[in-house]
Image (cartoon, helix red, strand yellow):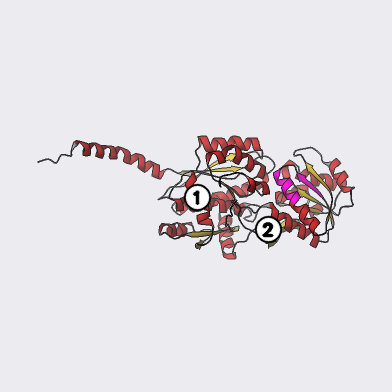
């Protein structure tokens, strides 16, 4: 006698058969991660290696089998043009039209603040900036959605002030780009420099993309007999022009720079001889040597012509890995779940995992073991405002090259 399902069971079985392909498709669909970088505008020179660091992290995650039973992470890229308004526009597209689960970026502090306030905080989208360093980022009313793997500028200003005094410089003039990054870092440096007995002979916040800054430089150089110019800027939107104007006019002979100007292109374009001996600071690495080596070897294999130690590259790589681990730990690609698990995978205690160990970390998570990611830029350890702990790099121009001198904690 043929076996016949009761009508209700038959309907349920038919529905399950119809739903099965849709469920399988959903499980196999890539997880879209937004990446907002400043591919054009004042920060464009920094983007190629930063993007390469993110690509390396995604390739490692996907090459190890992805997350959530084989789902790949897919980059959805956008260019904010180093402009807050453009940043808000592209972030809106990523969040509303592209439905990204999280965002890496933006790069600049002012753009990060604008994007967070207008787009990502209201939508509950977690963002991790690898390079937004202004103290004001910590003050966003963000519902715990804004994180950064770069060290805030408060520490950078203190370290730069100490290095300046140790170089025998007692009097400096300060020029800083007129945005959250410039004002914040200049303020931090000024307070720390004065506390160490130094004198800021004059200070000027400048607007970007002007054809000449000779008038400002002339005024600063003739006030208080400064021994050096401390410059907080971006190369393509004023920084290089200020250096060229100063060199051509003979206004300053010594230069103190910050992370926004840490680029070999600056030396090549402005002039190696004139910048010889210039020094500066930027977010550095506190990574254990073996973890840093694993990252650098992998980066160089994938990008033979790029520098894995370039500004914010390790921080970008770490941001991507942390997002992947948070998705795995959450067991979900939902935005709120990712946000809730960023500290779970980044902060101690836990089984330490590092660069190149995503498969091992995923297996530990599957066994119910809490992991603690210590990355290419150091232990991440997000604090209550989403800021990561780290070190400050002391760098200098020597022999026409930008070279790393030391990694400092204060």
Where is the C terminus found, in terms of image quarters? Answer: bottom right
Q: CA distance from mark 1 to mark 2?
A: 28 Å
Verify CB contact (< 8 Å) between mark 1 and mark 2: no
Left/right placement of residue 155 relative to residue 120 reads right
Residue that extends furthest to the left in the rendered view of this protein: 1
Which residue is disc 2 drawn over? 392
Secondary structure beneath label 1: helix
Q: Position of residue 123 (x, y in %)?
A: 53, 39
- Whether residue 364 is visible to the viewer of this picture, yes or no, is yes
Q: Residue 340 — which label?
A: 1
Q: Position of residue 41 (x, y in %)?
A: 68, 40
- N-terminal of the pair, mark 1 or mark 2, is 1
Residue at the image position 39 percent from the left and 45 percent from the top = 27
Q: Residue 174 — which label?
A: none
Secondary structure beneath label 2: strand
Q: Nearer the viewer, residue 121 or 397?
A: 121
């Amino acid at each position: 006698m043929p076996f016949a399902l009761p009508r209700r069971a038959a309907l349920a079985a038919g529905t399950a058969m119809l739903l099965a392909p849709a469920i399988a498709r959903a499980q196999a669909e890539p997880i879209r991660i937004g990446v907002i970088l400043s591919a054009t505008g004042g920060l464009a020179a920094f983007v190629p290696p930063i993007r390469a660091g993110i690509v390396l992290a995604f390739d490692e995650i996907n090459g190890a089998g992805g997350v959530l039973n084989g789902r790949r992470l897919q980059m959805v890229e956008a260019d904010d043009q180093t402009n807050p308004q453009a940043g808000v526009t592209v972030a809106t597209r990523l969040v509303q039209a592209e439905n990204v689960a999280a965002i890496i970026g933006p790069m600049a502090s002012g753009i990060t603040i604008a994007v967070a306030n207008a787009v990502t905080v209201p939508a509950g989208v977690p963002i991790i900036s690898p390079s937004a360093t202004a103290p004001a980022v910590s003050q966003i009313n963000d519902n715990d959605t804004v994180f950064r793997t770069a060290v805030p500028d408060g520490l950078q200003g203190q370290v730069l002030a100490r290095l300046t005094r140790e170089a025998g410089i007692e009097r400096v003039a300060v020029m800083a780009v007129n945005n959250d990054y410039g004002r914040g870092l200049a303020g931090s440096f000024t307070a720390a420099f004065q506390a160490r007995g130094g004198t800021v002979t004059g200070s000027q916040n400048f607007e970007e993309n002007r054809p000449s800054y000779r008038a400002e430089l002339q005024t600063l150089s003739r006030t208080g007999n400064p021994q050096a110019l401390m410059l907080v800027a971006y190369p393509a939107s004023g920084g290089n022009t200020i250096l060229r104007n100063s060199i051509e006019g003979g206004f300053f002979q010594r230069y103190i720079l910050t992370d926004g100007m840490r680029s070999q292109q600056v030396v090549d374009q402005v002039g190696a001889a004139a910048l010889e001996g210039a020094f500066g600071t930027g977010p550095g690495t506190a990574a254990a040597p073996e973890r840093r080596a694993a990252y650098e070897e992998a980066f160089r294999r994938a990008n033979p012509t790029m520098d894995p130690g370039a500004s914010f590259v390790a921080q970008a790589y770490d941001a991507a890995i942390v997002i992947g681990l948070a998705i795995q730990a959450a067991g979900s690609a939902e935005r709120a779940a990712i946000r809730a698990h960023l500290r779970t995978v980044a902060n101690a205690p836990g089984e330490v995992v590092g660069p190149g160990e995503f498969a091992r970390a995923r297996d530990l998570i599957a066994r119910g073991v809490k992991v603690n990611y210590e990355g290419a830029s150091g232990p991440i350890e997000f604090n209550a405002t989403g800021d990561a702990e780290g070190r400050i790099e002391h760098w200098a121009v020597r022999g026409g090259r930008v070279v790393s001198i030391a990694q400092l904690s204060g």
